[in-house]
Amino acid sequence: MSPPSRPDPSIFLSDGGEVGRLMRGMDWAAHPLGPVAGWPPALRSMVAACLNSPMLGTVLWGPELRMLYNDAYIPSMGERHPWALGRPVAQVWGSAWEAVSPAFFEVLRTGRGMQQQRVPLPIERHGRRVDTWWDFTATPIRDESGAIVGLLNQGSEITDRVLAEQRRDAAEADLRALTRELAARVEERTRDRNALWTLSSDLMLRCRFDGEMVAVNPAWTDLLGWTPEQLVGHSVFELIHPDDVAPTREGAQAASQGRPLVALRNRYRHRDGSYRHIEWNTRSADGLINAVGRNVTEVEAQAAALAASQEQLRQSQKLEAIGQLTGGVAHDFNNLLAGITGSLELLRRRVAEGRLQDIDRLVIMGLGAARRAAALTHRLLAFARRQTLAPKALSVNRLVVGMEELVRRALGPGITLRVVLGPELWTTLADPHQVENALLNLCINARDAMPGGGTLTITTANRHVLPGEPSGADVAPGAYVCLSVADDGMGMPPDVVARAFEPFFTTKPMGMGTGLGLSMIYGFAKQSGGGVEIRSSVGQGTRVCLYLPRHEGLAAEDPAPAEAQPMPRARGSRTVLVVDDDAPVRGLVAEVVEEMGYHVLQAPEAAAALQLLRSDAAIHLMVTDVGLPGGMNGRELADAAQALRPALKVLFITGYAENAVFGGLQPQPGLQVLTKPFELAALAAQVDGLIAGAS
């Protein structure tokens, strides 16, 4: 057998934008860093992460701290790009580096990351020296031995924000000065106030409580494109985004009662039809609302980008956990398949021999194994699905019981699982998928801490944290539901426990973990109003407790299983087109539909189905698989079919989750989804329901 081919060593530079393309084209053999194939794994992985990050960042590598940065860094480089690629940071930034380097060298010396905010930094930009301000972090990069070999520097330039704040502070200082001089210099104060009104970059507004604008300053023209003549006399609600009208009206109502508004945010329509995010501070006087609005559109965009990055990290963590499950799931799924195929073989042999007394037992055995296999695949699909966080009234005991089988598969035969459920456990309010994610990741961490086998214990309990009581979870006094995972493995020393929640910190070997698991669990717990506590001793094992606040409501009940219904019969003379490239599945569906009393047409792929749809045959319903060969999938076939026959109803059958068919949207009228494997009665019920609605 020939050895497996090695991947292109520069593949980690793919999808890296402009900088990625430049780096792929560079002659690294002549560079001090050497050929890409010889780069250490830590350098390759960190450069790949940096290149594909939306946040401004640069990798500083080796004794000379040579710079390898991403596209977001380019605007800050000015004319230094692309000359700066691979050069020492001191050579690139000169005096600017001298000003900030002590903090970076402290990170190299101590191994502790640092974060600095509002750092003033004079730099050369476009041939002249300018003052800039920055927020940035530095994180040490370690090689396989744990030695620090470089730094990851990320940050953002906040010069515009600082300058805007300085301008605002100066304007406010002017206003205060004018107020102090009010008694002696009324005329001068009025003149200066008018200048502030005219020159301010912030929106200034005077309006009635019903929203009618009385006066606006020129900044409205600069920011939103509307002149004062176009605005005065009209209602502010004509400009506000429809989704923001209701909360803004509530704010106006509060202002009419004399209450000031602070940091009220809404969206105002620009003259070109786009929207700007504005943050308002208001006070009412003389029957009018006096308001100052600051443009926070960029701040909102940065917050949205951060939320998207956090969601991406959550999904990556789920996928990593599923990767850890693969071995155990494959083993148990093969056992389930053995039960199905074995039952079928015995069933065929008994029928051939005329021994019919055991047929029911064999059928029940096969169906039971098939249902357990279906439950396993549905659990994995639900766990991996990307979806919006949705806190619900939750029974943690019920969740643990539902996860127990999946956890056992993840642990393998060498680990003994104990589950101790607290009696009369309180309800908590949390996202159940996040709790499942946290539980599974804690169990995988515990498994990895017991390479020689051991016992893992999952415990639930009610817990009161009293005022003044020390709590390792750092939670406020109150009532909590505690979900804990304990192992009797290697344990951790105090210095490792102290850093366990740091992002990207991991004690696992290179390639065995991202270091994001506990930090994500910690973030989820804090967002839910709780916390996480770790107790560990070297050689004595580890116990991680997830604190979730008590919820006074009742947990939602699991839906009761539906009772079996008789097979519906045909509603008059109707024709059903069945499309599936899997002949046994296609034949099974066709046979069920024919038993209902309908006429059936069959097609193995989309092209053959379209031929039938273009014919004169009367077709009232199409049942199609989503994954079809030949270049057109079932979703695309349905679009083409309904273009030919607008009244055609479509039933999708798929092995994927339902939102894989509709992209997270609600199914359209006349389109339904049935997930494989399915009960024949469920298939018949959906066919009957769609036929009933067909013309």
Image (tube, grey):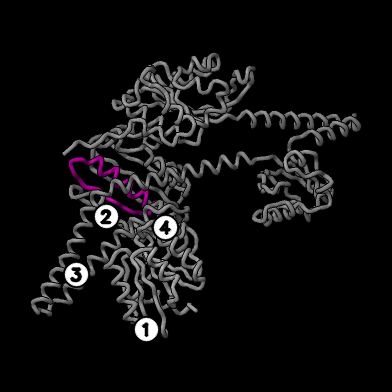
Which is more N-terminal, label 4 or label 2?
A: 2
Mark toward the viewer: 4 or 3: 4
Task: Name the residue tied to disc 2.
Answer: 419
For the point 50% across and 36% down, the residue is 54
Which is more N-terminal, label 1 or label 2?
A: 2
Looking at the rendering, the stretch of residues picked out in magenta corresponds to: 436-463
Q: From this viewpoint, is residue 530 visible?
A: yes
Percent across and percent down for residue 638 are 45, 65
Task: Name the residue tied to disc 1.
Answer: 569
Neighbours of disc 2 within 10 Å: few (<14), some (14-19), many (20+): some
Mark toward the viewer: 3 or 2: 3
Q: Eyeballing the image, is 367 above or below 535?
A: below
Q: Secondary structure at mark 4?
A: helix
Picture quadrant where residue 430 is located:
bottom left
Task: Name the residue tied to disc 4.
Answer: 660
In the picture, the disc for residue 400 is none
